Amino acid sequence: MESILIASMIVLFASMLQACTGFGFSIMATPFLLFIYAPQVAIQINIILSILISIFIVPKIYKEVDRRLLLLLVKGSIIGAPIGIGIYLFLDVQVLKIIISLLILALTLLLILKFTVKQTTGKDLTSGGLSGLLTTSIGMPGPPLLLYFSGARIEKSVLRSTTLTFYLFIYVVALVMQITFGSTNIDIWITSLILLPVTVLGMFLGQRLFRYINQRVFQIITYVILAVTGVHLLVSSI
């Protein structure tokens, strides 16, 4: 019961960020759920709930999606996803978490220092590939997209709608791959179902909050989320 209460608080906050920014759920939920559940359980709960969030929100924001960018992200992820499932099945997740945490912290510092990156087709494909890899391996597609989009100064509504729509695709792919090549059990699905109401509440609150956040505040939230996630991943992995 205690683990469900703690997980509910994590999921509430993470789903608010997801609805508000388009990237908050996996970045915030997965690292903290790892404190409560085994890695495979935490990752699959995150994926299941993220799919439900995207199904709920995407129809309302699809008109804002950058369709060209979305297609490039999908193409890149098709290459990255099989590599990620190999990592999920055979490599030490702790080592991967340390590498990701150091990368997130380094790139967050660059963004705070006003580092910018020019958006290109190749970089769109690469960010999609890395996102696909991280989704199937640890259930966290957000960091590559968030870092790239923030550095490219993509407008917040486009960032939010495009990433959420992309997540719907890549999370379904990841879940199918993990069920096929990995492992799942009824307890994971029951826990996800128990956490669904608080996830819906978080989405509702996040959508209301989105209306009151300007681009500058949006960037600050981005930096804080990345920094907290990077530090948390590093500390929990050492």
Image (cartoon, rainbow, N blue to C red):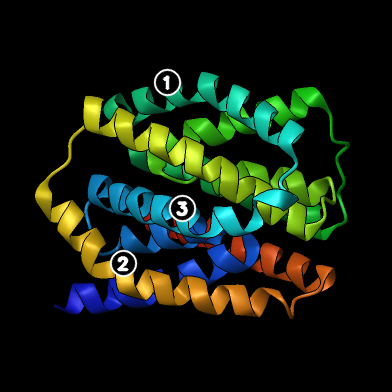
* Mark 3: secondary structure: helix
Q: Is residue 35 above or below residue 167?
A: below
Residue 45 position, x and y percent, is 29, 54
Residue ID at (66%, 52%): 161
Quadrant location of residue 200?
bottom left
Q: Which mark is residue 162?
A: none
Residue where numbered disc 1 is placed: 82
Q: Amino acid at mark 2?
A: Leu
Asked if the residue at tag 2 contacts the one at tag 3, i.e. Cβ–Cβ closer than 8 Å, the answer is no
From the viewer's perspective, is 69 left or right of 23? right
Residue 186 position, x and y percent, is 11, 50
- One can see residue 19 in this view: yes
Residue where numbered disc 2 is placed: 196
* Of the image marks 1 and 2, the number of the one nearer the N terminus: 1
From the viewer's perspective, is 132 left or right of 2? right
Query: Would you call the spot at circle 3 few (<14 residues within 10 Å), some (14-19), or many (20 or more)?
Result: some
Residue where numbered disc 3 is placed: 55
Residue 218 position, x and y percent, is 74, 68
Residue ID at (75%, 41%): 66
From the viewer's perspective, is 36 left or right of 154? left
From the viewer's perspective, is 109 left or right of 143? right
Q: Amino acid at mark 3?
A: Ile
Residue ID at (83%, 70%): 216
Residue ID at (33%, 37%): 175
Report the mark closest to the observer, 3 or 2: 3
Say which of 72 and 3 sits in front: 72
Report the mark closest to the observer, 1 or 3: 3
